[in-house]
Image: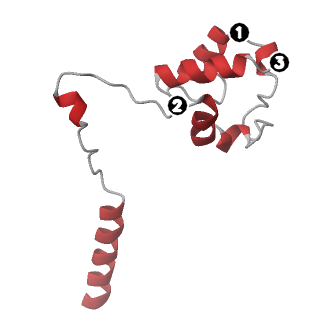
């Protein structure tokens, strides 16, 4: 019984430490007083990292709506507002403001 309990505790500790809240190392540039907001890159890269899980690899839709012609339905500002504030099943705050702006401009061109 003790071996099972120890194995359970050890396994739990191992899993929890793997998922633990390790802090991101502080950027050296921010120590010098320079503030830099890093973005993921181009709109396509941001979408590939954050959006394809719901909207599909080609933005064809999935659990989220099809975005292939979203610019015909919404303006850039409306798209940015949806990204930041959420709408329907889409949760708010999935992207930082700068990334949301880049993606909204890119999606607004899809007509």
Identify whether 37 is placed above or below 74: below
**Along the line of sight, which residue is nearer the eye, 64 or 30?**
30
Task: Identify the element where label 3 is drawn.
Answer: loop
Residue 41: image x %, image y %? 52, 32
Q: CA distance from mark 1 to mark 2?
A: 19 Å
The dot on residue 75 is 1
Task: Identify the element where label 1 is drawn.
Answer: loop
Residue 77 location, quadrant: top right
**Along the line of sight, which residue is nearer the eye, 2 or 86?**
86
Report the number of numbered marks: 3
**Along the line of sight, which residue is nearer the eye, 21 or 5?**
21
Question: Is residue 102 visible in the rendered structure shown here?
Answer: yes
The residue that label 2 is drawn on is 94
Callout 3: 10 Å neighbours few (<14), some, many (20+)?
A: few
| Image depth: mark 1 or mark 3 in front | 3
Q: CA distance from mark 1 to mark 3?
A: 11 Å
> Which label's residue is closer to the chain start, 1 or 2?
1
Q: CA distance from mark 3 to mark 2?
A: 23 Å
> Which label's residue is closer to the chain start, 1 or 3?
1
Identify whether 29 is placed above or below 17: above
Residue 87: image x %, image y %? 64, 21
Residue at the image position 28 percent from the left and 75 percent from the top = 9
Residue at the image position 28 percent from the left and 90 percent from the top = 3
Residue 89: image x %, image y %? 65, 30
Residue 73: image x %, image y %? 80, 13
Task: Identify the element where label 2 is drawn.
Answer: loop
The dot on residue 35 is none
The residue that label 3 is drawn on is 111
Badge 1 vs badge 2, beta-carbon distance below 8 Å? no
Question: Is residue 86 visible in the rendered structure shown here?
Answer: no
């Amino acid at each position: 019984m003790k071996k099972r309990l120890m194995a359970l505790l050890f396994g739990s500790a191992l899993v929890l430490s793997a998922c633990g809240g390790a802090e991101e190392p502080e950027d050296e540039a921010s120590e010098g007083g320079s503030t830099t907001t890093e973005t993921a890159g181009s709109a396509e890269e941001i979408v590939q990292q954050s959006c394809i899980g719901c909207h599909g690899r080609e933005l064809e839709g999935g659990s989220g709506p099809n975005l292939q012609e979203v610019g015909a339905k919404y303006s850039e500002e409306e798209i940015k507002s949806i990204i930041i504030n959420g709408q329907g099943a889409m949760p708010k705050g999935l992207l930082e403001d700068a990334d949301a702006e880049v993606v909204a401009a890119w999606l607004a061109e899809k007509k």
